[in-house]
Image (cartoon, rainbow, N blue to C red):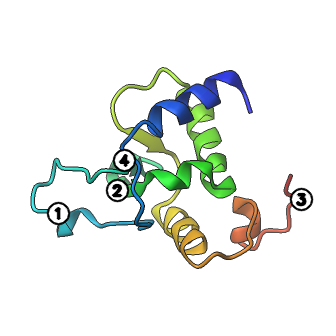
Amino acid sequence: MSISMKKLMRNLSKVTHSTQYSALQPDSSKPRPDSVPAGHFPVYVGLDQDTTEKFIVNAELLHHPLFIELLHRSEQEYGYAQRGVLRIPVDVVVFERVLESVKHGEGCSCLDELLGQSVSCR
């Protein structure tokens, strides 16, 4: 893992740590749209402006291999200098599959494996 990736993960994990695990909390359940619960952080997910959705995810995901792979994709697309909310350039359906896989403890170790593609994963 590169030094910049470690720095990004360190900065994102400075969010107050939550002892209760919740992979996804839809924004519609929040009393205020701008509030993010302790131990969570916002993420914009989508391939373009028209399909981008905002998710609130648990900071514990920062250490999961599938989420780290998503962070790598974000770094490749936007670099580490992106400002504001973290953006992940994958289809929303793919991101939701990642969250479900993590939530259910499925043993997928890379995105291609999760999607059923025959690609050798690291």
Confirm or deny contact between disc 1 and disc 2 (CB under 8 A): yes
Left or right of residue 113, residue 68 in this image: left
Nearer the N terminus, badge 1 or badge 2?
1
The image quadrant where one finds the N terminus is: top right
Confirm or deny contact between disc 4 and disc 2 (CB under 8 A): yes
Mark in front: 3 vs 4: 4
Asked whether 3 or 53 is in front, the reply is 3
Q: Please give the name of the residue rendered at 44% of the width and 26% of the height, measured from the top-left corner.
A: 82
Left or right of residue 75, residue 54 in this image: left
Nearer the N terminus, badge 2 or badge 3?
2
Q: How far apart are marks 1 and 4 (CA)?
A: 13 Å
Confirm or deny contact between disc 2 and disc 3 (CB under 8 A): no
Q: Please give the name of the residue rendered at 30% of the width and 50% of the height, measured from the top-left corner.
A: 38
Q: How far apart are marks 4 and 2 (CA)?
A: 6 Å
Confirm or deny contact between disc 3 and disc 1 (CB under 8 A): no
Look at mark 2 in the image and give the residue it sits on.
56
Label at residue 41 = 4
Look at mark 3 in the image and give the residue it sits on.
120
Which amino acid type corresponds to the residue marked 1 in the rendered image? Answer: Lys
Which amino acid type corresponds to the residue marked 3 in the rendered image? Answer: Ser
Look at mark 1 in the image and give the residue it sits on.
30
**How many other residues sit within 10 Å of disc 4, few (<14), some (14-19) or many (≥20)?**
some
Residue 93 is situated, as x and y percent measured from the top left of the image, at: 50, 68
Q: Please give the name of the residue rendered at 36% of the width and 47% of the height, measured from the top-left corner.
A: 41
Q: Residue furthest front?
A: 19
Q: How far apart are marks 2 and 3 (CA)?
A: 30 Å
Q: Please give the name of the residue rendered at 64% of the width and 75% of the height, measured from the top-left corner.
A: 105
Nearer the N terminus, badge 3 or badge 1?
1
**How many other residues sit within 10 Å of disc 3, few (<14), some (14-19) or many (≥20)?**
few
What is the secondary structure assignment of the residue under circle 1? loop
**How many other residues sit within 10 Å of disc 1, few (<14), some (14-19) or many (≥20)?**
few
